[in-house]
Amino acid sequence: MIDSTTAIRDTVTSGENSSGSWIIEHIVDSNVLDFEPFGTIHLPSFEINLFGLSIHLSITKHVVFLWIAAILVAFFLIYTARSYKKSLIPRGIANLIEMIIQFIRDEIVTPTIGEKYIPSFLPFLGTVFFFILTCNLLGLLPYGATATSNISVTASLALLSFLMIQLAGMKKNGVIGYFKGLIPHGVPVFLLPIMFVVEVLGLFTKPFALMIRLFANMTAGHVVILALIGLIFILKTPFISPVSILFALFIYLLELLVALIQAYIFTMLSSLFIGMAIHQEH
Amino acid sequence: MFSKIGLINFLLLYSGGEKGGLLDVNPGLIFWTIITFLILLFILKKTAWKPILQALKEREDNIRASLEKAEQARKEAEEILEKNRKNLSEAEEQVKKIIEEGREYASKLRNEIISRANVEAQKMLENAKQEIENKKQEALIELKGIVADLSIQAAEKILEETLDKEKHKKLVEKLIQNLPKG
């Protein structure tokens, strides 16, 4: 929070645009890791030309935090897996992770997809859950950035989820069978073309909703916290700070909850959609 | 409605800026996200998910088996307890029976002994009576003889020579026979 407050003070006091651009600047991706007052790290920026299209493959702030999240998830899950070699009784952090995995298995995958599909889908859904959760929580740390509040990141995760849903459905029902199964039984023949279009659109709206939901939820909380802190500088009085800080703390605690809930919802809905693609008789 | 338009303005206003806005889609970031996620998924699938799921299943099976075993052991123990209880009650009954039998036998034996002793005593009494009777008879006979002799001697002394011994004896015997029997 320190870095944001200094940034806010700088932007607000310098008489620049005070309508909220500093909030956006704080949330969006950048090429700089800001560690004020300890300094900043400029990340390498490069782009490649692919068929005349230039694509920025710069290692941005959010890429760095994605990697940190990936490393943390890998560390904790491999640590948990290793701990079983010593004994079947989990201890400490392994116990917590095991509890979450059991929850994903018994409360998310089993009721929505089915017990016999656990080995094929739990690795994906579990990785999604832990990856999103870690990204969300990293954003709550000082100097942290929320990669999941970037729409490109949530779009990528939703795209992977979309591919997983379609592949799961096609593998189970066959490509033609899968598209046939999209249309509910008992629909009049003249409605078939419309229904088909609607259902195919539905395939795309599901991951689109996943993308927007995660992005909006993770962005909103940060915007509110930054706005509350910014209140001190906008009103130019320190007497508002207790109110701002109390409210920001409340929102921060709410954000902790939201971080967990959004990871759960993304996983739960992906699992549900995979289940719907596999069991098309519903 | 106004707030909605305001929000859209807010989002769009900063999406065209130099630094990029909230809704800017960055293909590079998409690329990195997908690559990062897929590598993470690949690594975890090999190193973490398989052993974790396996261990979970193994432990669950273990617990299930243990519970089943415990249940079975409990049932067995209950059966044994029931059997023991039954055996105990049976044994108790048997003991009671044995004691009863023993008591009965003892009382029978006592009665028998007592009755036998009674009979014996009766018999002995009878024998003694007989003996006494016999002795009495013997004594009487002897007494008779002695009385006869004494009477003869007395008669002899009184009569002296008046009667010979043979005649005398006959006379006394006649006298004795006329005596009342006692």
Image: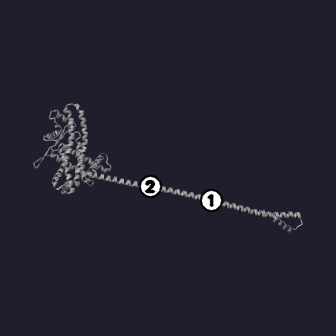
Instruction: Judge the density around disc 1: few (<14), some (14-19), many (≥20) Cα neighbours within 10 Å.
Output: few
Image quadrant where residue B3 sits:
top left
Query: What residue did someone put label 1 on?
Result: B113
Tell which residue pokes out farthest to the bottom in this image.
Answer: B166
Q: CA distance from mark 1 to mark 2?
A: 46 Å
Relative image position of residue A73 (x, y in whole percent): 24, 46
Secondary structure of the residue carrying tag 1 is helix
**SS of the residue under disc 2:** helix
Q: Position of residue A198 (x, y in %)?
A: 17, 51
Q: Position of residue A129 (x, y in %)?
A: 24, 47
Relative side of B46 to B171, left or right: left
Q: Which mark is residue B103?
A: none
Residue type at mark 2 is Glu
What's the residue at 72%, 61% (across, down)?
A: B129
Q: Is residue B35 visible in the rendered structure shown here?
A: no
Label 1 is placed on what type of residue? Ile
Residue, disc 2: B82
The colouring scheme, among rainbow, by chain, secondary structure or one colour, is one colour
